[in-house]
Image: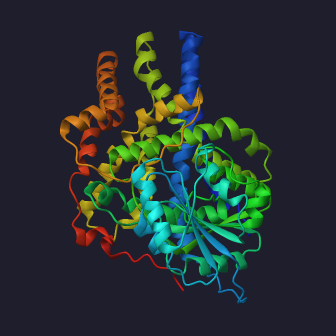
Amino acid sequence: MTKSPRLYLIILGCWSVLLAALLETSLDQIDAATRAGWPIVTLVVASTVFIAYFWLNGTKDVVYTLYYHLISARRSRPVPRRASAAQPRVVLVYCTCNDFSADSLLRSMRQDYGDFDVVILDDSSKPEYLAQVDAFGAEHGVRVVRRADRAGFKAGNLNNYLGTAEFDYFVILDSDEIIPPGYIGRSLDYFAAYPNAGIVQANHIATRNRNAFMRMFSIGVDSHWIAYQTVKDRHGFLSLLGHGAMVSRECYTEAGGFPHVVAEDLCFSIAARDAGYYTVFAPDVVCEEEYPVDYLAFKKRHSKWTQGNMEFIKRYTGVILRSRMSWFEKLDIVLFTYNLPLTAVFSVYVAIHVVVLPVLGYRIEYPLWMLAPTALFLLAPMLNDVIFHFRAMPKLRLAWYLLHTILLYGSMLFISFRASVTSAFGKSVFVVTPKEDQRITLRQALVANRAEIVFGVLLTAVSIYLTGSALPVLLIAAPAIFCFYLALKHNTATPVADAAEPESREPVTAA
């Protein structure tokens, strides 16, 4: 397994051209600001640094997407079947915490493989879920493991069992995970093809979309997994992504088990990489997962990810710098994992331009050409969706999806800021994403999202008062104010005939 810096050389080359033009403009602005005093100079410099970082992230998204669709997608790497007939001992490790799904686990157990076991690691606290797990275990002869404490979140649950279990490989299953019948055999093919692989991460699509919210946004899962993980596999840092992954015993042991952090998958992958093991992506091993069941569940998952990434920044920045990884793998980790918590920095940027500079009576005049890269990079995270679904999806539906995507992720600014600050000055919390949706009223939607709505209204009022316009904060304030609409969207159920296999996507393992 070898990785190439080609992708990041392209990213940095494109960004350098933009950065040179930005610095030329910024030097003139800084020179003009010196006449207004050092506080203004400091604000202008801070604004320039943010724009440079924002453009770097945007360049990464554009290059990643174009590289996949123009190059990687056309250079498939067929992995042959194993020559050996040996069957290593494999255990399917199903993790649940008040979200047990008997159907998902039963379907995952239908493996075309001989020597495998199944164990349920149950962290549930609610009696109804404890009873469901026990009944399933008794009916299907599946071992159930519960621990005395809840230390270490999901990582602690995994280590509690794996530390004493007998296996050659284990597979991590989340509660909504469904792996195809050929999953074990095909994953072992990848281990045989790549001797330095310690983790084989399968591909995923979103299925069982039982309401309008899930059906609207789940298509982003299908396009994101295959594009980004394929490119990371050769040109970035590919991590175990929490579920649908097979890990070897040697890798688990050498990495020291799962660290007791919220982002246990990422941190374990870094430890494995330092121990000499790579994570390999298996694009033809297609598993099923569920998209968050409603807007409130999506917010909780986003909060967990943000807290996990902030905890990662605090505890693992030094680890990355000292790591044996290549420079471009380290840069890949920084650009992808530091992105969510640094949304809080974007809040500072908004405050500078909407509040501080207007109060000080100063205005930064940006040249018109800067609108082009800024607009492109604002939309860059959706570029992959556009290319991936452009031919198959009706254009009006695609436009409707993109509009909702802007609304969905734009409304996450407040929760990102709150989660970042909470985690930066306190402990990160592992939040289990709810799996059950309930019909809610308009009043309940407004109450549940009152913090975001108040934030959006106040931000709009401040912008109008200090700058005379709401345009500077439109893409932040509007999604925050109208997020209650997204909170109501799941009330519309998807017809039963469409819920199991949306748009005729077949989650199978390729030969």
- Can residue 21 be spotted in the picture? no
Image quadrant in which you'd find residue 280: bottom right
Q: Is residue 316 above or below residue 511?
A: above
The structure residue drawn at horizontal position 42% and vertical position 50%, both measured from the top left corner, is 127
Residue 26, position as x, y percentages in the image = 56, 29
**In front here: 481 or 240?**
240
**In front here: 156 or 334?**
156
- Can residue 121 be spotted in the picture? yes
Position of the N terminus, as image quadrant, is: bottom right
Residue 371, position as x, y percentages in the image = 42, 39
Residue 5, position as x, y percentages in the image = 70, 59
Q: Is residue 496 above or below residue 263?
A: below
Image quadrant in which you'd find residue 80: bottom right
The structure residue drawn at horizontal position 45% and vertical position 10%, both measured from the top left corner, is 360
59 left or right of 238? left
Q: Is residue 134 above or below residue 79?
A: above
**In front here: 203 or 39?**
203
Q: Is residue 249 above or below residue 452?
A: below
Residue 343, position as x, y percentages in the image = 50, 35
271 left or right of 177? right
Image quadrant in which you'd find residue 240: bottom right
Q: How many marks?
A: 0
Position of the C terminus, as image quadrant, is: bottom right
**In front here: 298 or 36?**
298
